[in-house]
């Protein structure tokens, strides 16, 4: 039985083409030899497609991209650990205290303070309600330069007439750089 010149498989002598490769067997003669000076291989290889990587070519820059992502994630984790280790102080101050009205406000205007206003050119008006026990609590942004002008407000209701009063608190101006501060205001 003859063999296919392309793949070497045995084929029937009556077959005109190789069943495995489809190579024509009519031109092939087992007793003939190729003309001198010409090379005729007995095999063929499939054509390499354009852009298809071979075993010797890299698969692209995928390895580098993965390495960069891993390094970035490690950097974020280490940065987070360092930040939590060396805590950065908050940029607000928790200020607590009491608010009272002195003479003549407490008697002349029948004053009961109900609001405390911290006015700053940088933050505007920040206010805290005054509780029945005359205490207050407010979170103030820490001002790197400057301070707050503090005002006490109250409402007076006499015989159905409603009057609104304010006074500048003492101490005023007020600044706070501590994380937790206590300050009593009065006027």
Image (cartoon, rainbow, N blue to C red):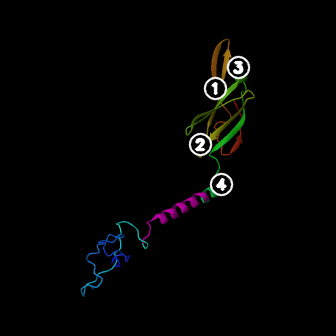
Residue topped by disc 4:
84
Label 3, residues with CA under 10 Å away: few <14, some 14-19, many ≥20: few
Considering only vertical position in the picture, is 103 above or below 32?
above
Residue topped by disc 1:
166
Give the quadrant of the N terminus. Answer: bottom left
> Tag on residue 108?
3
Whether residue 96 appears in this view of the structure is: yes
| Dot placed on the residue nearer the N-terminal end, 4 or 1 | 4
- Marks 4 and 1 in Cβ contact (< 8 Å): no
Query: Nearer the observer, disc 2 or disc 4?
Result: 4
| Dot placed on the residue nearer the N-terminal end, 3 or 4 | 4
| Dot placed on the residue nearer the N-terminal end, 3 or 2 | 3
Q: Is residue 36 magenta?
A: no
Mark 4 to mark 1: distance in Å? 44 Å
| Secondary element at image label 1 | strand
What's the residue at 61%, 60% (across, down)?
Answer: 78
Residue 114 x/y as whole percent: 68, 26
> Tag on residue 146?
2
Query: Nearer the observer, disc 3 or disc 2?
Result: 2
Residue 133 x/y as whole percent: 75, 28
* Residue projecting furthest to the right: 133
| Dot placed on the residue nearer the N-terminal end, 3 or 1 | 3
Q: Main secondary structure of the magenta part?
A: helix
| Secondary element at image label 2 | loop
What's the residue at 70%, 42% (across, down)?
Answer: 181
Q: Quadrant of residue 10?
A: bottom left
């Amino acid at each position: 039985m003859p063999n296919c010149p392309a793949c070497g498989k045995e084929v029937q002598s009556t077959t005109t083409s190789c069943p495995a490769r489809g190579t024509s067997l009519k031109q092939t003669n087992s007793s003939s030899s190729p003309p001198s000076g010409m090379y005729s291989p007995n095999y063929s290889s499939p054509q390499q497609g354009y852009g298809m990587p071979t075993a010797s070519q890299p698969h692209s820059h995928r390895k580098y991209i993965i390495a960069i992502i891993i390094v970035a994630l490690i950097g974020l984790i280490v940065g987070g650990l360092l930040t939590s280790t060396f805590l950065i102080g908050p940029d607000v101050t928790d200020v607590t205290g009491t608010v009272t009205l002195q003479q003549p406000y407490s008697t002349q205007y029948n004053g009961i303070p109900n609001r405390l206003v911290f006015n700053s050119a940088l933050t505007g008006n920040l206010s805290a309600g005054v509780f029945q026990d005359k205490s207050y609590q407010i979170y103030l942004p820490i001002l790197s330069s400057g301070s707050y002008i503090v005002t006490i407000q109250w409402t007076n209701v006499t015989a159905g007439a409603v009057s609104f009063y304010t006074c500048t608190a003492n101490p005023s101006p007020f600044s706070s750089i501590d994380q937790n501060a206590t300050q009593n205001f009065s006027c």
